[in-house]
Image (cartoon, rainbow, N blue to C red):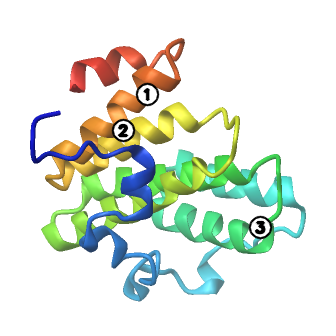
Amino acid sequence: TQLGETKKSVQDIINRPPPSVQAEVAAPSVPLEEKKPNSERDAIPDDMKAHYELARSYFKKKEYVDAILAFDEFVVRYPKDKELLDNAYFWMGEAHYVRASELKNKKAKNKSYKKAILSYQKVLDFKGSNKADGALLKIGLAFEKLGFVQEAKVFYQEVVNKHPKSKLVKEAKKRL
């Protein structure tokens, strides 16, 4: 680190993200005009695993708005779950991230990348999550897409440092 520079850590950025990312915390996950009426959506099952699988099926079918809504409902219904909650946040992040890459409107695209970052960050709250390395890499990629290159590098370096056996280390090193 050179004089006058501060070396940010993942925790620093998570605790104090760039203001434009932080502004997305209170914003709705999906613009109201993109939500299907309830009559056009599948009923969300009461069973936790069935609910999770329904949300994943939306993602697999590239129905990202429905996936986001179903995962959003999942994290509200099962906030104390130890088995699937980190995965639900990860896949919600993935849905926002992929959706962002498909959007033409720059403002909407950036909003979706910011929502992805916020979802991936939730994964990092789960010690030992099998999705932590992926969440770190994707946070970096999303920050990079938003033009926050230095912040992105912090997350890539974290993949290399904290997950040396991960298959994502190669990609993280390449991005560095």
Residue at the image position 48 percent from the left and 15 percent from the top:
167
Residue at the image position 25 percent from the left and 72 percent from the top:
20
Mark 3 and mark 1 in contact (Cβ < 8 Å)? Answer: no
Amino acid identity at mark 2: Phe
Mark 3 and mark 2 in contact (Cβ < 8 Å)? Answer: no
- Residue 52 in the image: x percent, y percent? 74, 55
- Residue 33 in the image: x percent, y percent? 38, 87
- Quarter the C terminus occupies: top left
Amino acid identity at mark 1: Val
Q: Which mark is residue 79?
A: 3
Residue topped by disc 1: 159
* Residue 146 visible at all: yes
- Extreme residue in the left direction: 3
Amino acid identity at mark 3: Pro
Label 1 secondary element: helix
Which sits earlier in the primary sequence, circle 1 or circle 3? Answer: 3
Label 2 secondary element: helix
Residue at the image position 10 percent from the left and 47 percent from the top:
4
Which sits earlier in the primary sequence, circle 2 or circle 3? Answer: 3
Distance between the alpha carbons at the discs numbered 1 and 3: 26 Å
- Extreme residue in the right direction: 47
Residue topped by disc 2: 155
Q: In this view, does 120 lie to the left or right of 3?
A: right
Mark 1 and mark 2 in contact (Cβ < 8 Å)? Answer: yes
